[in-house]
Image (spheres, rainbow, N blue to C red):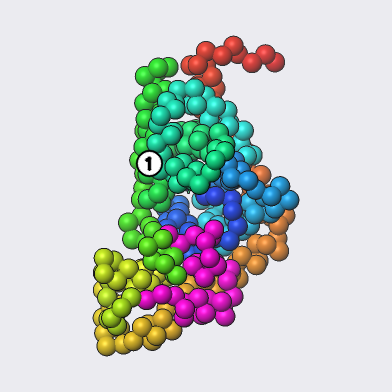
Amino acid sequence: MAENRKQIAVSGIQASGNLHIGNYIGAIKQFVELQDKYNMFVFVADLHAITVPQDPKKLGAQTLDAVYTYLACGLDPKKTTIFIQSHVPQHTELGWILNTITPLGELERMTQFKDKTKDQTSILAGLLNYPTLMAADILLYNPIAVPVGEDQVQHLELTRTLARKFNSRFGETFKEPKALIQKDGARIMALDDPIKKMSKSGNANNFIGLLDSEAEIRRKIKIAVTDSGKEIKYDPATKPAISNLLIIYSQMAGLDIKEIEKKYVGKSYSEFKADLAEVVLRALKPIQEKYNKFAKDKKSVLQILRDGAAEARKVAETTMEGVRAKVGFLEALQ
Ligand code: TRP
């Protein structure tokens, strides 16, 4: 089948709810574009989600919510294998094995680990081992490419290191995958502080949720911080706030930043913001409609996930059979 000749790409996204336009522009939109080019595996990383405490009563619903959102954004189960990380136990199994060849120092120097633990007195091991599980997520599928945000590049570098270490210790097994980083819009900044990344854990006015109401979207854009001066110009060094809004405009409208700048010569920040709100609303409306449609059809979505996990397990198990043999485990007894 032609499908099988396509090269593989793998990516995961956190299970936490409330995905926002930063996630959409920086990641989901890219997956949707890549699914024609690659044989994609995309999963909701619920095992990673629990490296920070989650409410057991909400985790499952949040996981499903992320799936509805992916589907609503255009991820297509006919082209992409969509599944939940914890439904494919090989992720945990390979993660463990990789831990045994990972130097502690490598994990301790990861920027994300340092950021997440800087105010904590009692640090949990799961947070430290987060990157080895991520390496397992990737290497199980032997992908050529991993579409990720800029903040994940270091984890990908570690993944390549672990692939090399495993290969040199146990024999050629894994390919070293490349990060596919979206240049434009990879980092959408907070609306209330353009120096910080847009984040669902920050103040609610800092992000536009993909499911925010029309009134909320207009309000958040209206109160978004701007820079001094009044020109609508892309210049991240001196105009970080307007530059961020221009990126959002450009990504949501599918226009070049240059064209947008031209359109707003001599216009005010408030005119620009009013139009930006329309652009965002127009882009999010079909996503919200599809979200509602999928959320009402939970049964079909669960079937997509069942099929996705079955397909992922097949590929992952083939990899693990090789890995177990190379590590030297006694063959499983039937
Ligand atoms: N750590 C990634 C993030 O925070 C999510 C993730 C988990 C991932 N496993 C992955 C991304 C494997 C790419 C490949 O965005």
Front one among 67 and 270: 270
**Which residue is located at x 56 percent, y 52 percent?**
77
Is 243 above or below relative to 78? Answer: below
Relative to residue 166, is residue 44 drawn left or right? Answer: right
Residue 42 visible, this angle:
no
Amino acid at pointer 1 = Gln
**Left or right of residue 137: residue 234:** left
Q: Residue 89: image x %, image y %?
A: 62, 33
Residue farthest to the front? 121
User: Residue shown at 42%/22% (left/top)?
Assistant: 166
Nearest the eye: 50 or 173 = 50
In terms of depth relative to the viewer, which is nearer, 12 or 175? 12
Q: Which residues are magenta?
A: 197-226
Using the rendered view, name the quadrant where residue 196 is placed. Answer: bottom left
Q: Residues within 10 Å of mark 1 (few under 14, many from 20)?
A: some
Reading the image, the residue beneath label 1 is: 154
Q: Is residue 153 visible?
A: yes
Residue 198 shown in magenta: yes
Q: Residue 110: percent from the left, percent from the top?
A: 41, 39
Q: Position of residue 153 (x, y in %)?
A: 37, 44
Asked if residue 279 is among those painted magenta in the image, a careful observer would answer no
Image mark count: 1
Q: Which residue is at a point 54% across and 40% down the rendered structure image?
A: 121
